[in-house]
Image (cartoon, rainbow, N blue to C red):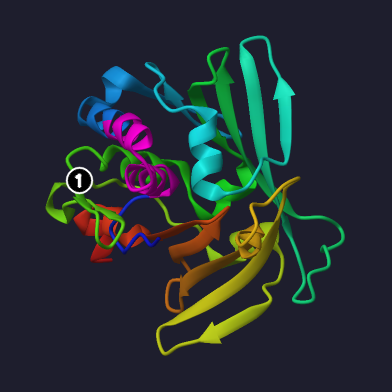
Amino acid sequence: MKILVKKIPLIGILMVALMLTGCMYWIRAFQVYQQMDDFDKHFAIAVTDEFTLQFKEPILYSKDFVSLSKLQPSDDSVTANGRKWRYLFRKIYKDGNLIKPEINFYSDLHFNKENKLTAWSFSSLFLEIAPPKFLEVSLRSIGGAEIDKEKKQLKANSALLEKISADLPKKAVVVAKLGEPLEIKDEPEQEIYIYHFLLETHQIEKGYEDRALNEVKITFDKKTQELTRMAGRFAGLKVSINYKKFLAEHQEDD
């Protein structure tokens, strides 16, 4: 599965994928998709050191995520309100060995006692490559997006995307947090930094072992040294976001 430039992050890909994998998954995913048309009625966003998308009227079940990714979470713990799943991604060398000292990020899924998703959080390190303001506007852009079942994509109308005024992260800051990349692809106007992160998981469905390896590509503009694009695969879900498409026009012209 692939999200193209000007499209949407993890939650959007999840919805499309679930729509294509089974009748009940399709119904539940489509209901969440419909909720996106009135974002503030059905969702809330909280930003601390994490970014959390809160589901006011939960629909998706924990089993939907396993059916999609074919991967069990790194950790499954009981909470006062239900359960919390954590998907932990650790940076690795090309040979597959873990980087020392460890560099990692995580994604937490919170479920109520009915096993329905109530909140989805992303850790601070992930926000270095997917800043909160850009995550929020891309989530909001899902409402009214076109579903392409053949290509397994959810396509937002670029003319309707909300524009924001925000600073793009600088290369020096990002690299200071993520460390040196495995590889750098040098292009005329940009550099692409490639990182590998390995998902810690207790069980992988046979035939899907490659989904535990997550390659992240981060593009920096040579002139401005700004992070302009992020592409990666996280637990089998592919994401590609061009951040400059979300910037207010005066910023894009700078």
> From what the image shows, is residue 106 above or below residue 90?
above
Q: Which residues are magenta?
A: 9-30
Horizontal and vertical percent for residue 87?
65, 42
> From what the image shows, is residue 139 above or below residue 78?
below
Q: Is residue 102 left or right of residue 206?
A: right
Which quadrant of the structure image shows residue 141? Answer: top left
Which quadrant of the structure image shows residue 209? Answer: bottom right
Horizontal and vertical percent for residue 2?
38, 62
Q: Is residue 222 left or right of residue 151?
A: right
Residue that appears at 73% across and 24% down: 77
Secondary structure predominantly adopted by residues drawn in magenta: helix
Q: Nearer the viewer, residue 215 or 166?
A: 215
Q: Which residue is mark 1?
A: 145
SS for tag 1?
Answer: loop
> From what the image shows, is residue 31 above or below residue 113?
below
Horizontal and vertical percent for residue 39?
27, 27
State whether residue 47 appears in this view: no
Mark 1 burial class by Cα count in 10 Å: few <14, some 14-19, many 20+: many
Check the picture and name the quadrant holding the N terminus. Answer: bottom left
Q: Amino acid at mark 1?
A: Ala
Residue that appears at 31% across and 47% down: 165
Q: Nearer the viewer, residue 195 or 21?
A: 21
Q: Is residue 12 magenta?
A: yes
State whether residue 11 appears in this view: yes
Q: Is residue 86 magenta?
A: no
